[in-house]
Image (cartoon, rainbow, N blue to C red):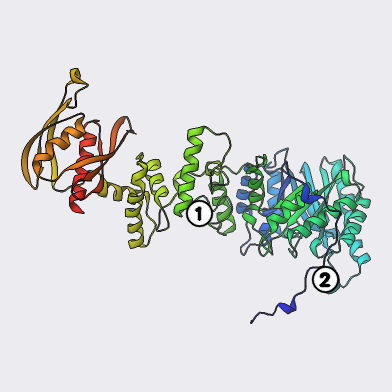
Amino acid sequence: MAMNYKKYKPYPKFDFKERTWPQKVTTKAPIWCSVDLRDGNQALPIPMGIEEKLLLYKMLLKIGFKTIEVGFPSASETEFNFLRKLVDEKLIPDDVTIQVLTQAREHLIAKTFAALKGVKNAIVHIYNSTSELQRRVVFNKNKEEIKKIATEGTILVKKFAEEARVLGMNVILEYSPESFTGTEVDYAVEVSNAVLDVWQPTKDNPAIINLPSTVEMSTPNVYADKIEWFCNHVKYREFIQISLHAHNDRGTGIAATELGLLAGADRVEGTLFGNGERTGNTDILSVALNLYSQGIDPELDFYDVEEIKDVFQKVTQLPVHPRHPYVGDLVHTAFSGSHQDAINKGLKYKADNNVDFWEVPYLPIDPSDVGRKYEAVIRINSQSGKGGVAFVLEKEYGFKLPKNMHPEVAKIVQKDTDDKGIELKKEDVLKLFEDNYINVKGVLELIKYKVNEDSSNEDSDAVVTLEGEIKIFGEEKKISGKGNGPVSAFLNAIEVCNIGKYTVTSYDEHAREEGDKSQAITYVQLEDLKTNKRFFGVGISPNITSAPIKAIISAINRSKKS
Ligand code: KIV
Ligand code: ZN
């Protein structure tokens, strides 16, 4: 093995047998905070300019975020000017709180408050790394020295906040013991408590303690254990919000957030589509739609997800993966035959039985809830089966194929996809169906016909007589026949043509609305009594007598081709 796993050591074990979170259930949405414009932005190869930030900010408002971290105003002119634009152009609704990040240093905090001037509700977010590794390797500071950075920063924020309050700004302190996941949890509590002792949180002067998994280092259950332990030991618990800020280095940022909520956290920081440093931040959209799929109001609206995606992709210049939970281009799509069949049955069951709850196999949420159309659900390639083909023909074109016809139609479609090696469009499926079953040209052609019904003689076998003209093997012929309906009268009439004897083995019909016109569609299966082989034919006509006759002609012509 070329890789050397021996250079890694396991994440330290955290013993916390008293944990209660595994028994809990989430029943309401957390307080959401979008960090797209800060954490998301700082991770972009090409950071957003003011116009891009504004576009995304407006989208975040539209989704329903009430707390938005708009940037790091002391870090660059763009960040500073963006916040000023929001204030000067009155782009901050009264019920929205603006969050800004700053390092805990006096000149940076001063610049941050200057950028905030005029904001009504602000969260000033300070952070310093408390992790064992960074204390040792990056800062070369002991625990007391690191704690002092946090408390001194808080003293400064408190001073600036008191001044700002006089000018009408509500300021909430947020403190992050950065790299919480690399910090001894008792030390994280010690530093946070020291910060809170300075801030003195009350009902009217709350604070937020944000516990970032700056780098995701363990399984999400360990993060949850630490969150619960932290919640149990932090001071002023009733006056502070515990916030989660999970990154996704192990690919479990969403899970860590969900378990962290069970463990007692009140608030979630994250980004749309999980953009953020390295492997990204928690994807808020997935966490919210996971709640939604459990019947919980997520308090964020992702109905316009296509537009959200467009804006996101435009401003970040990052693609959204086609398999992204809930919103990727392919996530409400089934190519596989057995999945298509189950979805088809699930949708039909729901419609037929008027069920209130969403219970469709393979579709955890109703695609239309995120603005998706059902056409995209079932798509046809070589993996598709009978259910999928029948679904497309019914949903798109109104053909309700009889069940016994599904397998052979699917076979024709599957052969075509196999031959071509591509996905078929719905129009291609229709064309294959038409070419193979509807008005199939061949040995028999109908020129004209007339049907007479003797309604006085209902009990007799022959109540319908048919007279007409056909072309058989290119030769025109007059025909006449009798039967108990137009189908049997026609079959009787063509017996003289020496094209063999047929009997009807299945017959289905329904009406199809097309614009303001209604058409009859008939599906007939005939058995050639000489070979005992069966052939379907389909006829469409505005006239309910012509449709079955056309279906018979198609079936006979197909039988002669085989
Ligand atoms: O990931 C992180 O630790 C951060 C902090 C600044 C909160 O983004
Ligand atoms: Zn982060």
Q: Position of residue 234 (x, y in %)?
A: 89, 52
Ligand 2 sits in which quadrant?
bottom right
Vertical placement of residue 223 versus 393, above or below: below
Task: Say if disc 1 is inside 8 Å of ligand 2.
Answer: no
Amino acid carrying mark 2 in the image = Leu
From the image, tell me which residue sits under label 2: 133
Tell me if mark 1 has few (under 14), some (14-19) or many (20+) residues whose alpha carbon lies within 10 angstroms of its own.
some
Which quadrant of the structure image shows residue 412?
bottom left
Q: Position of residue 38 (x, y in %)?
A: 70, 56
Residue at image coords 81%, 65%: 182
Q: Position of residue 12 (x, y in %)?
A: 82, 68
User: Which quadrant holds the N terminus?
Assistant: bottom right
Residue nearest the viewer, comparing 20 with 118: 20
Point out which mark residue 330 bears: 1
Is residue 406 in view from this perspective? yes
Q: In the displayed structure, does residue 521 sit left or right of residue 464?
A: right
Q: Earlier in the sequence, mark 2 or mark 1?
A: 2
User: Which quadrant holds the C terminus?
Assistant: bottom left
Q: Position of residue 552 (x, y in %)?
A: 21, 40
Amino acid carrying mark 1 in the image = Leu
Q: In the displayed structure, does residue 264 sit left or right of residue 152?
A: left
Residue nearest the viewer, comparing 93 with 118: 93
Q: Kindly report which numbered mark, 2 or 1, lies closer to the viewer in this rendering.
A: 1
| SS class, disc 2 | helix
Spatial CA distance of label 2 from label 1 is 41 Å
Name of the residue lying farthest toward the top: 456
Residue nearest the viewer, comparing 101 with 108: 101
Residue at image coords 55%, 44%: 370
